[in-house]
């Protein structure tokens, strides 16, 4: 990890403003980047909808600014209000660099940055989300509006894009939103390996496959439940545990009664949201995430770090991490029977689980550790420092 770079005597540190929709999202995924920004010599300020995590952010030495944003909103009046509020914040803060995370923050942040003359900006597409996944008429309409707007917002030479997988880079550059020379591929935000040590699996007659994610249809949870039905019909003993809550702000959220119905049917266990993910992953034997699209799936990174084999659909983001037959299995997209086959194979073969899981851990050490990712982000942000 690089040491903090001090500004010259008598000079102020340049200001970097993080723009995210939710304070919890900053705490769960962006702290390593914020620390890298501080290492790169920036005074870091965070703007978001502040609810339960403001004190945690400020305790780390980052100043916070409330942004009147509603992540779940699709009301044009609320959206215009959020954009105008962000423009007000940018005019007041006058940041040297802005760092926008996820699509809504990128859209409004890039517009505000361009209108307010911000020196440089980084736009992290941490997966392209439902706007680019869904083929519903509404989201196709939003996509048709968003694409030319993003092209305009990303046009200046002082604007950089950051992606977490090769597919997203190819799509954004193909749409003319980004360019090859201004798009950085950084695979995730980095894992602290001390918090996720390689851990032997527990000895049991009934292995456990664990999915850690928000309870969304596009995380492949419906297909996983169908795979559970296949396994049950075959007489295979495997506990399938879902960890996470529904997300009512997301149109793909699975209703709580549906989750409880699957539990009552004996197909899955639903543990809800947990704050001790590093500990509960140690109870697992297999990590599964049949997501339709990811940036870089953090829950699989965490499971790989403790030495668990990975099972995922052959989908954007997941295929960058999961190497079929090396550290887990890639399953044909939305194929619940093939998903059941992969889980069946790992359920029956403890030696295979251990071999693939150990390789998963080695992959994390080489490519996805906090030190490796933080060094890369620090280099990018250092290159944007004024002066």
Image: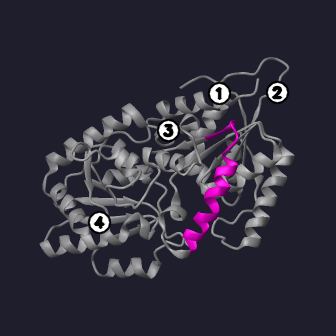
Is disc 2 placed on a helix, strand or loop?
loop
The residue positioned 83% from the left and 41% from the top of the image is 94
Instruction: Using the image, determine if residue 78 lies above or below residue 126.
Output: below
Residue 314, by quadrant, is bottom left
Point 66% across, 59% down: residue: 52
**Residue underneath mark 3:** 186
**Which residue is under mark 1?**
382
Question: Does label 1 or label 4 sit earlier along the sequence?
Answer: 4
Magenta range is: 138-160
Q: CA distance from mark 3 to mark 1?
A: 15 Å
Q: Position of residue 383 (x, y in %)?
A: 65, 27
| Cβ atoms under marks 3 and 2 closer than 8 Å | no
Quickly name the residue at label 4: 240
Q: Residue at x 49, y 39 (%)?
A: 185
Which residue is labeled 2 in the image? 12
Residue 325: where, in percent of width, then height?
21, 46
> Which colour assignment does the render follow?
one colour
Viewer-nearest of labels 2 and 4? 2
Sort mark 3 into few (<14), some (14-19) or many (20+) by Cα contacts within 10 Å.
many
Q: Is residue 172 above or below residue 36?
A: below
Cβ–Cβ under 8 Å for marks 2 and 1: no
């Amino acid at each position: 990890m690089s040491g903090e770079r001090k500004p010259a005597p008598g000079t102020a540190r340049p200001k970097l403003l993080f723009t995210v929709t939710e304070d919890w999202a900053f705490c769960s995924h962006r702290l390593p980047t914020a620390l890298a920004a501080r290492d790169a010599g920036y005074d870091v300020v965070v703007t978001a909808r502040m609810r339960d995590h403001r004190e945690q952010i400020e305790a780390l030495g980052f100043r916070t600014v409330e942004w009147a944003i509603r992540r779940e909103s699709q009301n044009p009046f609320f959206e215009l209000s959020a954009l105008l509020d962000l423009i007000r914040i940018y005019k007041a803060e006058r940041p040297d660099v802005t760092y926008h995370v996820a699509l809504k923050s990128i859209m409004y942040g890039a517009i505000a940055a361009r209108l307010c003359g911000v020196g440089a900006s980084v736009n992290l597409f941490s997966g392209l989300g439902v706007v680019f996944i869904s083929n519903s008429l509404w989201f196709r309409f939003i996509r048709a509006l968003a694409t030319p707007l993003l092209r305009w917002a990303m046009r200046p030479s002082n604007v950089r894009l950051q992606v977490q997988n090769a597919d997203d880079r190819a799509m954004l550059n193909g749409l003319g939103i980004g360019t090859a020379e201004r798009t950085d591929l950084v695979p995730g935000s980095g894992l602290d390996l001390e918090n996720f040590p390689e851990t032997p699996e527990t000895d049991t007659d009934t292995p456990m496959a664990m999915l850690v994610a928000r309870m969304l249809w596009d995380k492949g949870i419906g297909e996983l439940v169908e795979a559970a039905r296949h396994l049950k019909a075959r007489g295979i003993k495997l506990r399938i545990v879902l960890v996470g809550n529904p997300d009512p702000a997301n149109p793909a959220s699975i209703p709580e009664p549906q989750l409880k119905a699957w539990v009552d049917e004996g197909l899955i266990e639903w543990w809800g949201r947990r704050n001790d993910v590093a500990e509960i992953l140690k109870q697992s034997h297999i990590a599964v995430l049949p997501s339709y699209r990811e940036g870089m799936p953090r829950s699989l990174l965490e499971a790989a770090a403790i030495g668990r084999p990975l099972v995922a659909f052959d989908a954007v983001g997941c295929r960058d991490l999961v190497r079929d037959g090396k550290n887990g299995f890639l399953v044909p997209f939305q194929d619940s029977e093939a998903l059941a086959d992969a889980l069946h194979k790992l359920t029956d073969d403890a030696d295979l689980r251990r071999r693939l899981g150990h390789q998963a851990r080695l992959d994390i050490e080489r490519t996805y550790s906090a030190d490796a990712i933080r060094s890369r982000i620090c280099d990018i942000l250092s290159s944007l420092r004024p002066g």
